[in-house]
Amino acid sequence: MRVALIGATGNAGSRILNELVQRGHQVTAIVRNPERVPALSGVVAKQGDVFNQNQIAKLVAGHDAVISAVHFTASDPHELIGAVRQSGVSRYLVVGGAGSLEVAPGVRLIDTPRIPPAVKAEASAGVTFLDLLREERQLEWTFLSPSVMFIPGTRTGKFRLGKDKLLSNEQGSSISFEDYAVALVDELETPQHSRQRFTVGY
């Protein structure tokens, strides 16, 4: 597939880029600093400003899907969603956040003391992004929420999927960037959660 990956050099984005390349997809890596994109077969780096809807729309036009892997507090959901809609690309996958996941019926993680103050703004912005997507009627969007601990690790390919409830085990709630990338690219290749949010964890 031809995939436009916005934020290809971040923690999640760089792992998603590697996963896409390993599976033979053609990737346009849209970043602030193209020189930071590794020289990989099938990857073209493009400079893009996530706050410039018209520019992003032109960069992603003609692709089979767009993946957004940028921090919510470092972007504008209206601009990003608007850019994909404007581009004519229908598939839009978003690296989500854990804050909107339920820890009890009707109780979201963000509404509990488990969210550290340092990440409260990012979590809140992620909730806003998901709310906007749920109102979206044109795009075939998917929002993949990670677990609470979203950290560097190894690619095991072994994890669980859920819908709106936070996944956890005896060690807590976690997923590696590497395994998250596996779950996201699986969804790209075989859509199971169109116009839905789902989550991944151990």
Image: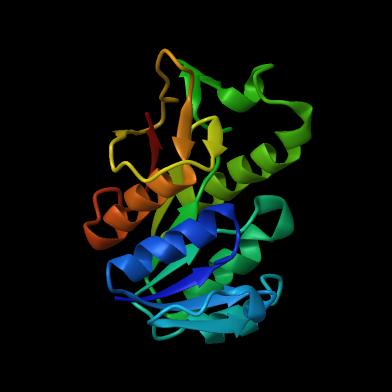
Q: Is residue 76 visible?
A: yes
Extreme-right residue of the structure: 117
Question: Relative to residue 122, is residue 72 depicted above or below?
Answer: below
Res 51 → quadrant: bottom right
Q: Position of residue 120 (x, y in %)?
A: 73, 33
Query: Is residue 157 rendered to the left or right of residue 38?
Result: left
Q: Position of residue 52 (x, y in %)?
A: 69, 77
Q: Residue at x 68, y 61 (%)?
A: 76
Res 148 → quadrant: top right
Query: Is residue 33 rendered to the left or right of residue 60?
Result: right
Q: Residue at x 58, y 53 (%)?
A: 11
How many marks can you see?
Answer: 0
Q: Position of residue 154 (x, y in %)?
A: 42, 43
Q: Residue at x 49, y 29 (%)?
A: 101
For the C terminus, the quadrant is top left
Which scheme is used to colour this image of the protein? rainbow
Question: Relative to residue 84, is residue 116 depicted above or below?
Answer: above
Extreme-left residue of the structure: 190
Q: Residue at x 72, y 26 (%)?
A: 116
Q: Is residue 135 visible?
A: no
Q: Position of residue 34 (x, y in %)?
A: 63, 80
Given residues 122 and 33, the one toward you in this image is 33
Given residues 160 and 136, the one toward you in this image is 160
For the N terminus, the quadrant is bottom left
